[in-house]
Image: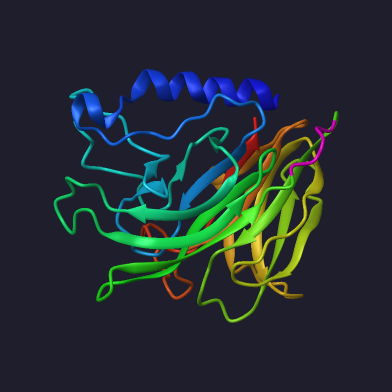
Amino acid sequence: MKKINIFTTALLLSALFSSCKKDGVHEIATTTTDNAAQIKLYNFGINSPSLNFYANDAKVSAISSVTGVEATTGVAYGSIFPASNYSFLTGGTYTLKGITPTLAATDPNVTVATLQTTLVNGKFYSLYTSGFFNTATKTTDAFIVEDKIPEANATSANVRFVNTVPNATQGFDLIVKNTTTLTETVIARNIAYKGVSDFALVPNGVYEIYARYANGTTNVISRNGTSVVSFIYGRTYTVSSRGDITVTSTTAVNRPFLDNTSNRP
């Protein structure tokens, strides 16, 4: 699976993007080695502008453009790049950055998030921008977690929880509720801001998901009704909380939300 993911990503990147020497588009970082570090990028800094992500000065994310010019949009708030699988980099020490697009209408080419880290070949990572976007300094917080992806299971999915809500009053428990059996299962307990749980097995099925304050019974963040999720056996998922806990609107972009992203399709 790892080899297929790497080469699929490489083919897509080489087909979609060119180097800056030919057409002025910033270069997309690629590598042809099987044994690379792989990374997924989450723009979860509340009210953050759209961002392009860089490892040192090499771009590792982009929104495609048919004109040959860098798109004015990047990875929007609440979005992930890539949506499926991972980008990959040769292992080493990097300054990871989230930067507004060069041609953005507002605040172009501003470094919003910066994180120094070491990536190891053969390991998987998720980088999150987080906290609140500071309108004065044009910055957000950022953190990185290792994705310790377990072996595929023949009957269950593997699910974990990452908490990126900066202003929750306590850590969160994550609960999943099977929509057929109505059985509730606790996936993670008391996960603080920037915290991450281990992966837990969840039987194949369709689920409502809830974040509750530690040991509580009240659903603080809910995903149910038309927004239930499927956990498919053999696959691996990360449920991430994001948003401003004080927002009560059910439609606001920055409302509290539970994102479900596949680490291994």
Could you tell me residue 172's position as x and y percent? Answer: 67, 69
Question: Considering depth in this image, is 146 or 37 the residue closer to the camera?
Answer: 37
Quarter residue 27 falls in? top left
Q: Quadrant of the C terminus?
A: top right
Could you tell me residue 238's position as x and y percent? Answer: 64, 48
Residue drawn 39% across and 62% down?
Answer: 113
Residue drawn 48% across and 37% down?
Answer: 82
| Relative vertical location of residue 8 with respect to residue 235 in this rendering, above or below | above
Does residue 139 appear to the left or right of 169 in the view shown?
A: left
Q: Quadrant of the N terminus?
A: top right
Q: Could one spot residue 259 in this view of the protein?
A: no
Does residue 265 appear to the left or right of 28 in the view shown?
A: right
Residue drawn 58% across and 43% down?
Answer: 261
Question: Considering depth in this image, is 104 or 20 the residue closer to the camera?
Answer: 20
What predominant SS class does the magenta segment belong to? loop
Residue drawn 57% across and 38% down?
Answer: 90
| Relative vertical location of residue 150 with respect to residue 119 in this rendering, above or below | above
Range of magenta residues: 149-153
Q: Residue pushed farthest bottom?
A: 169
Question: Considering depth in this image, is 257 or 125 the residue closer to the camera?
Answer: 125
| Relative vertical location of residue 236 with respect to residue 126 in this rendering, above or below | above
